[in-house]
Each structure stands twice: as C-alpha cells, then as structure tokens.
Amino acid sequence: MDYFREGVIPETDSHEEMRNIGKEIVLMKPNLYTEKCINKLMKDIYSFTDSKIEKSKAMDVFYETVYNYWVFGSNISEWFRYGFYSKNSSEKQKYYTSKNKILYLSYLNDKGQRYKLDDKYETYKLLKPYYNRRIMKISSEEDYEDFVNFIEKDQVIVKPENGGLGAGIHKISLKNSLNSYEVFLSVLREGAIYREENEWVHNSSVIIEEIIEQDKTMASLHPKSLNVVRLTTIRVNDKVVFFYPWLKVGMNGAEATGSYQGNSFDAGIDVNTGVVDTFGMTRNLVIKQHPNTGIRIKGFKIPKWDELISLASKLPPILPQFRYIGWDFALNRDGKWCIVEANYGGNQEGQWLYGRGLRKELEDIIGWRPSVRYWWSEK
C-alpha cells in the first residue's frame, strides 16, 4: 500500500507494527532516506541512548521514529523528550510537534514574509531599537574593512545568518591575533561550511554582534553563557498571549544556550510571576540545582519580569504578518531587556518541561484547528 497516495497511514499502538510501517516508508522514499540522512538520524538516536546500544535495537528505534514522524509529526528529539516510546496514539495526538506545527504556522503567519525572521539581519533591521547593541552582516571579502572597524579590540559573537537551535554560535576577538584578515576569512569559511551542511540554509552570510553584558542575577546562574528567556507570543486580534515561556541556561563552560546544544538546559517559567516552576531539563538529565554554580533552578526569580512582559507586548504589532513568534530575550547589565533573536516557528519546549501536550491549549487560544489529519496532507 502506498500510504501517501492513499493519504492515510494506519494508526497502531503496536511497536512491531510501527517499526514495520516505518521500514515500508523508508523504502517508499529513497530520495529522502539516503545513506547520509539515515546516518545523521542514527547519530541523533545515539545521542539520547547508551552509545553501546546494539545496532539492531537502535534500528528498531529508528523505524519507530520514522513512523511517528509521518503520523504525529514528531522528530527524534521529541520522540524521546515527550516519551512517545511509551504513549498511545490518542496521547501523542495531544502534542504540538515540530512538523504538525507547519499547519498552525500556515494559518497564523505569512509564509511569504518568513525570510524577515529566518534572516537574523533582516530581523535586526526591522527591530533595531530593541536590540540595544550593534550587529553587522559579513557576506564577502569586500566586508573586511567594516569587519575590522566593527570589532576593533572587542570580543564579538558570530552567528550563521540563517542558523537555528544555537548552532554555529561562538565568540571571536582580534585582540591577540597577528593576522586579522585570516580571522575574517575563517568567519567567511564558517558561513560557507554551515550552508553546505544544512540544506535549509539560504546563504553563507554570517552576522557579528556586540556581546551583551548581562545582568548580575542572570549571570549568576552560569557566567560563561548568555542566559536567556524564550517567550512565545501569539497575537489574537489586538491581544498578545504569552505561551509557556522558559529559561535557557548554559553549563560546564558552554557559551551557547538551548538544550539542543548539549551543555545547556531549559526550565519552565510561570508567565504570571516570572518564577521558574520546573526543574531544569536537558537530553538525559533532570537538573535540580546548577551543576557549576549550585543555584537551585526551581524557584529562581527572573528579574524585571514585568518590564519584559511590557516590552514583549509591544513587539508583535510591529510585525503584524506574524501572529506567532518565538522571542529570545536577555537582560543586560543596565537592566534593559534586549532582543537576542526572533523565530518564525519557535519550538514549544513547554510540552517537555511540563510533561503534557499543549495542542488543544494552542487551538483554544487561536480559535482554529487544522482540517487535515497529517502535516504532509496540506499542499
């Protein structure tokens, strides 16, 4: 049976049946499930399991995640984080996953304008007054002089212009460099490599940003990383709703935050009080207190929370074509909240942190639900 031509995939709670259907789908889509793709997906699976797991068992997991991807829209990370390996079909349907999110975004956001959020520099141009720092784009060797003038003797942050999930972010400085041009060329090469490795990336440009010197309270969690708040806004008519915010914190000396990056964890924040109300969570760990600084995670109070909510309420109307935005904010040492970035289709880690699906809550807020069963049914 060609599931995609028929437009239906049998729902089952049998793990054996899920794996068998997953195998059939892999065979149906050889252009998608290439050797390179499968190896990459297996690497993701091993990152959540014991690296010594038998290959046959790892392949069972792979085929089961393939099934869940096409039926429930969950990627490998979600399959592990949301506990899909032990949930039945009706429980899985309650989750707002990375792929069925496409259906909601097509209703809430203008896809034709997506580049304005996917491209970090485009977003900066639109919302410059709220960044509270300088940012510039590096695209070619013609940008060398501006690059040197921008950096001078300061350390800066480098990011892929179309990057995501904290990938490729790091700091550079010319302070101890004997050859600033080599540093510049290495930045250009990083952009080219990132584009080559990620097929969804549209260009090889990178951006460089002044470093945000963060507030002492936020820095106390882990001074090496910029610890940020993810605040998802949903605009319904003239009202802005804040959907399950969370805190991103680095650990073990890591500079980038976001639990997809390994040495970082997330924790849920009560939207009404700004108090962290879950333990920290990363791939395979529940974190009650920070492993490096010892600070207790649950009960940590985000400073100037009311000011953040006030700022975040003002931003969505500036971008009326996007009714759903995942914002990252950092509090600087002057007590000002700064936009770190804005995401067109920000993930919803609240489902993981609070241990329940939030799909119905989202639908109740926006007053809409998809008319199709599968994310891939929408043409």
Image (spheres, rainbow, N blue to C red):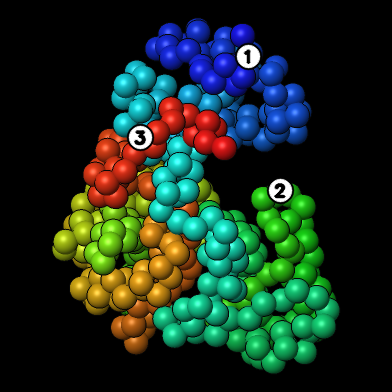
Mark 2 packing: few (<14 Cα in 10 Å), some, or many (20+)? few
Q: Amino acid at mark 2?
A: Glu
**Foreground residue among 94 and 77:** 94
Residue at x-position 75% and y-position 33%? 36
**Foreground residue among 196 and 107:** 107
Q: Is residue 332 above or below residue 53?
A: below
Image coords of residue 143 (percent x, y): 77, 83
Q: Sequence order check: which comes first, mark 1 or mark 3? A: 1
Q: Is residue 57 above or below residue 265?
A: above
Q: Which mark is residue 199?
A: 2
Residue at x-position 59% and y-position 63%? 115
Whether the residues at callouts 1 and 3 have beta carbons within 8 Å, the answer is: no
Q: Circle 3 is placed at which residue position?
A: 95
Q: Which mark is residue 2?
A: 1
Residue at x-position 67% and y-position 35%? 40
Residue at x-position 74% and y-position 24%? 30
Please, what secondary structure does the residue beneath circle 3 have? loop
Please, what secondary structure does the residue beneath circle 1 have? loop
Question: In the visual, does 239 lie left or right of 72?
Answer: left
Res. 154 in view: yes
Question: In the visual, does 111 lie left or right of 87?
Answer: right
**Foreground residue among 267 and 230:** 230
Please, what secondary structure does the residue beneath circle 2 have? loop
Question: In the visual, does 253 lie left or right of 326?
Answer: right
Q: Amino acid at mark 3?
A: Tyr
Q: Report the residue that reaches farthest toward the left.
A: 273
Between the residue at mark 1 and the residue at mark 2, the CA separation in whole angstroms equals: 27 Å
Quadrant of the frame with the C terminus:
top right
Viewer-side label of 1, 3: 1
